[in-house]
Amino acid sequence: MENSVCAVVVTYNRVDLLQKCLHAILTQSVGVAHVLVVDNHSTDATQTVVTGMTDDRVIYRRLDANYGGAGGFKQGIAAALRETTASFFWVMDDDTMPTQTALAELLHAREQVPNFGFLTANVRWKDDSPMNVPPLAGDWAEATRNGLVKVHEASFVSLFISRSRVNEVGLPFADFYIWHDDTEFTLRLAEAGNGYYVPRAVVIHDSQSNQAPLIYRDEASRIPRYYYLYRNELYICRRHKGRLTTIKTFVRDLYVSVKVLFVAPNHRLKRSLAVLRGTFSGLRFLPKG
């Protein structure tokens, strides 16, 4: 079907949020053909709840381990390609709550720019403040007459893509594990076709905070994750943003590794080493396809 849509939702141990997310998808003003739930080996009631759903549009795929967000999205989009005939994939985390007309607005935007690389929604936090705001393209005003804004990259908090573009550029890199897998994937998509922000396609991001994570203040248990943040950022600079940006990012990261030794509330050396390890790994990191 020309306009058929498969929603791809990646989840891990957040069954309450997942249920709200699935309800929001299944009650859209324009119906989805399928909802493919990728369970990153949850240990809560996720499997029981999803397999107990009676809506035959829901497809449940439980992974044999937790592959991180990047691995979950890669396997989810691959499964949507393989197991459905949908023309479009609507990709999101389990804490994304689309408003009732979000999909209709994305489909309308698709008609305005049929050769798009990706479409991204207007993401709001629980208090209606903006979040996950994508950076503008240099010629951002190019599409404003269609009610859209041209952007370079986007997140997996409601990303709308076509089967044909995925076949063209490939899947997200599972090797990213967490952080910036969506940035890299959408940069590839934007090289194949323009990316657009759709202001009227509103989704609520039901996350704990509307602040970007910072190595300076994050809780100690999350410190190891920052290795992936700094590694993945530097790879993206090398691959997509040129030598000058790569050098600037490398110098910035060295500065962060020093600054954290003075301003972090605890575990200062551990935080600094996470930044340094990630940064130097990013100089040679080559994710697999």
Image (cartoon, rainbow, N blue to C red):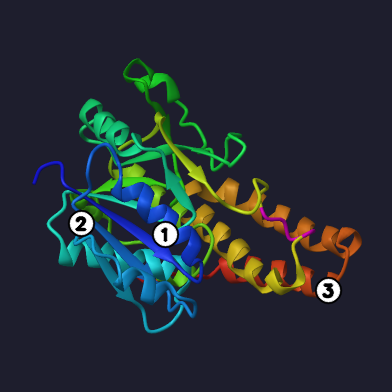
**Mark before the other along the chain sequence, 1 or 2:** 1
Give residue 116's quadrant in the image.
top left
Callout 3, which amino acid? Leu
Is residue 76 found left or right of 241 in the rendered image?
Answer: left
Residue receiving disc 1: 19
271 w.r.t. 214: above or below = below
Label 2 sits on residue: 167
Q: Residue at x 24, y 64 (%)?
A: 54
**Dot 1 surroundings within 10 Å: few (below 14), some, or many (20 or more)?**
some
Q: Residue at x 51, y 66 (%)?
A: 14
Question: Residue 233: x and y, percent?
Answer: 56, 57
The location of residue 224, given as percent across then percent down, is 67, 74
* Amino acid tagged 1: Gln
Residue 269: mark in rendering:
3
Magenta segment, prevailing SS (helix, strand or loop): loop
Q: Position of residue 3 (x, y in %)?
A: 15, 41
Mark 3 or mark 2: whose residue is earlier in sequence: 2
The magenta stretch spans which residues? 213-217
Q: What element does badge 3 sit on?
A: helix
Residue 214 shown in magenta:
yes
- Quarter of image, res 22: bottom left
> Which quarter of the image is occupied by the C terminus?
bottom left
Query: In this rendering, would 258 be left or right of 179?
Result: right
Does residue 56 belong to the magenta stretch?
Answer: no
Of residues 113 and 283, the one drawn nearer to the viewer in this rendering: 113
Whole-angstrom CA distance, mark 1 to mark 2, is 30 Å
